[in-house]
Structure formats: structure tokens, C-alpha cells
Image (cartoon, rainbow, N blue to C red):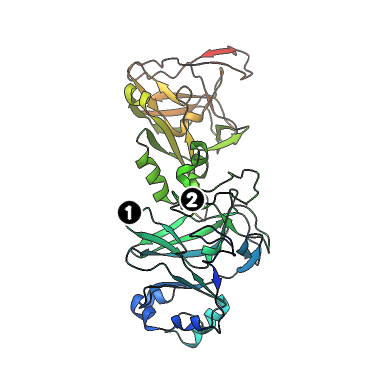
Amino acid sequence: MVCLQHRCDKGCRCMELISNSGGSRSKLDVRSSTLEQTNDGQHQRKPLSVAFNPEGELIVHSVMPEGISVATGTHGRCIVATKAFPRGSIVYRGYAGLVDTSTKNDRFYLYLYDHLDHKQAESRSPGHTFASQPMHVFRLDGLNSVKDYCEPNKSVRQVYGFDGLMNHSCNPNVYCPLVYRIKDEMCYDTIALRDIRPGEELTCDYACFDYECDGHEIAQCGCKAPNCRGEMKGFKCLSLEEKIRIMPMCEPEIVDTFFQENPNMTLLESMVPCQNIRLEVACGQTYIVAAKTFAKGDLIFSNQATIISVRTFMDQTFILKLVEKDATDEKNNVKTRYVILDKDHHFIHRPSYVESIGYDSFMDHCCNPNSEQHYENATTYSVYARRDIRVGEKITCDYLNLANEAEKLENVAKTTFLCNCGSENCRSEIFA
């Protein structure tokens, strides 16, 4: 376990395990009036309670969910799975308090409870949230928290319960997308990024929720992942490529702060029509394939282009957010990815402006393509099947035939590449 405030190991003075029988246990009883005054009945039933006691110390009561426990690992205390979690499953639903710490001292107490004891306590006395005796009590001389970037000018911090003990990894096995956020708390689901075995440590990427580690960076990362960055100094200090890679797992405020601090970066968004097509990646290249069968003449999709002035195009770096929502998915999952757009290959150049065409930027060229587009006006066009297309077949177009016939505008060639489409009429070298 590392101290989330200082990113230090269990030998640090700020992590002291308090004996349940010690004098510090009386600092705040789990049924004290401080918790009663801070939370209403609805909040009392949640597995996390955050409040200041009269001495200005932050008191956190947290219930360990079923399927995980606190253990001692290579880096000290950590969180491990006690049962298997398949990839994509919810490991647990977590909560964090949003606390203004500007006028309080930095002493912090964390009370951890077993989920079974918690359930038994609730059944015996519905008015009380927590069991009478915690499994663990920790005292920290620094807040187990990170700066909240929803309103970065305020002194609000995200205060975690048991999962404040989760270690960092540059190749984590969970991430925590936001479920909701209200004035004094945030709720998130912890999702398995890959299959997790019983006994395996749960890890997350701190850069997904810590923009710039304000005094508690990890100078030498010990995760030993093949893609280890060597250090953890927050999202802000990552390379642009690494930022783009982890953006889908980041808190929305982290992404928003990045674009606010980088006005030369423009974010474009595109919703993939997953009922008709899907995006696939092979050998590092993204391309479009058919999600269903199309007969010759069928509409494959309609799309809306974004017009960009030549001056803006020259000055900006463009990042595309692709949103894929499968209508057949009963869980209603949404897949998001970010891509740095190549100015020569991912845009259509017109004589006086440039078109951004979103997901359609990844359609491959073929000298004998199976689709063709027809424009209705300056920005709206539809793509139709030139011949029958099978499910899973790559959808292609002719890069030399991207004219906007409605506006009588040709596409301006910007780059040369060698074509290997394999068609009988392949032109070999394409200038498009």
C-alpha cells in the first residue's frame, strides 16, 4: 500500500495502524453525533461516510465490498480480489466524499468494516450504518485524497475510503468510470479491464484521476509493468500519446482541464452508427467493417462533416473522440476512444476549407471500392453500397472520388501513397 497523499510505503510516518484497543479508538465513536449531523438517512445507508470531528480531524467510515479485502503485498498494504472477476464486470461500486479541507487540519482517520458485519449491523439496527467494531483503523498525517478538478480554484478534495489503499500501476487491471456526482460526493463503478483471479492485487492508474500530483508524486514507479512510465507525476506530465491512450479511463474533469490548458488542441466528437458499421484495429491501423449485410444500393450510413477554416486547421492539433454504443448490448455499454488525427490522411481538403468527417476518417482506400458517397449539401452526405457487402467485410472508398457534387467542389490532393488494394485496376500510386 502506498499513502495516497505522499505516495510512500508502509514505513512512512503518515501510515500508522491503530490498535482497536488503543486510546486513539475513542477519537470518534462509530455512532457519534458527528456522523448523525453530517448525513441524512439516505446517506447513512451508503458504505462511505465522511465528516470532520470537533477537533477538525477528518473521519472516514468505509465498508469493504464483497469480493475484495485488504492485504499486504510487495509495496505494503493493498487491495486484493477474494473471488474471480471477468473482464468488463463491475468489481464494486465506489464512493468518494468531496470535502473542502481549506480550514481544517490534515489529520485523517480511516475506519474499515467487513461487508458481512455491516449487513448484520443494519439488520439489527437500521438506524446505524456501521458495525460496532471495524476490521482496521488507520491514522494518516495527510489526507487520503486527491485534488478535485471539477472546480479547480476551490480547495475541494476527493476523499476515498477503502480504495484509497489501492496501488498504482501503469498497466492497471481496473478503472473507475463516473456514475454520478452531487455536491458532496461522487459515485463510480470499478470495472475489470481484464480477467482478475482470486488473490490478485487490484490496481488503478493514478493519472486517470490525479492531474498534477500536488506534492505527492511517485518519483520511481514500482509497478514493473512492461509499459511502466518510470514515474507517476499526474496526467499533466504524460506524453500526448500516453494521454490519448488513457483518456477513455480518465475522470471527465481531467480531460476537460487538459483541453482548457491547451488551447491549441481541438476536440472533435463522433458517434459511430454501430447498428451498421464497427471500427476494428489491426497492426495499429483502424478501419471500418460492415456490422450487417448490405445489398447493392443499400444505405450504409449518413454522416455530417464539420467545416474547418484553413487558418484554424493550420494552427490546431485535432483529437477525435469516438463514441461507440452497441444497440444490441443489453448492458447499454458505451465504448470511447481518442485518436490524434493526421492532417494529411484524416481530413478532406476542399479549395477554401477542410472537412472533418469523424469516424469516416478511417475508411480505407480501394481502386475498386465497395461503397460511394453522395453529398446533399456542404456538410451532409450518405454512403451507399456499390455491390453486395458481407458482415465483417471491410468497407472501402476511392480517395480520388471524394468530390462534393452538390457544391461542385473537388477534393484537393495532399499526400502520395502506394496502394496495395489488390484490385485488377489498382493504380499502384495514389495522390489524394
Q: Which mark is residue 208?
A: 2
Q: Relative to 179, is 30 above or below?
A: below
Residue 88: x and y, percent?
58, 54
Residue 399: x and y, percent?
49, 19
Q: Tag 2: Cα neighbours inside 10 Å, few (<14), some, or many (≥20)?
A: many
Kind of residue indicated by mark 1: Glu
Nearer the N terminus, badge 1 or badge 2?
1
Q: Residue at x 46, y 84 (%)?
A: 26
Q: Residue at x 54, y 79 (%)?
A: 134
Q: Quadrant location of the N terminus? A: bottom right
Residue 64: x and y, percent?
55, 71
Query: Quarter of the image holding residue 383?
Result: top left
The residue tagged with tag 2: helix, strand or loop?
Answer: helix
Q: Which mark is residue 291?
A: none
Q: Residue at x 54, y 66 (%)?
A: 13
Q: Nearer the viewer, residue 143 or 78?
A: 143
Kind of residue indicated by mark 2: Cys
- The residue singled out by tag 1 in the image is 151
Q: Nearer the viewer, residue 351 or 144?
A: 144
The residue tagged with tag 1: helix, strand or loop?
Answer: loop
Query: Quarter of the image holding residue 430?
Result: top right
**Is residue 377 visible to the viewer in this orientation of the structure?**
no
Q: Relative to 418, is 328 above or below?
A: below
Residue 12: x and y, percent?
56, 64
Seen as rendered, the residue at the extreme front is 13
Q: Tag 1: Cα neighbours inside 10 Å, few (<14), some, or many (≥20)?
A: few
The span from disc 1 to disc 2 (Cα, nearest Å) is: 17 Å
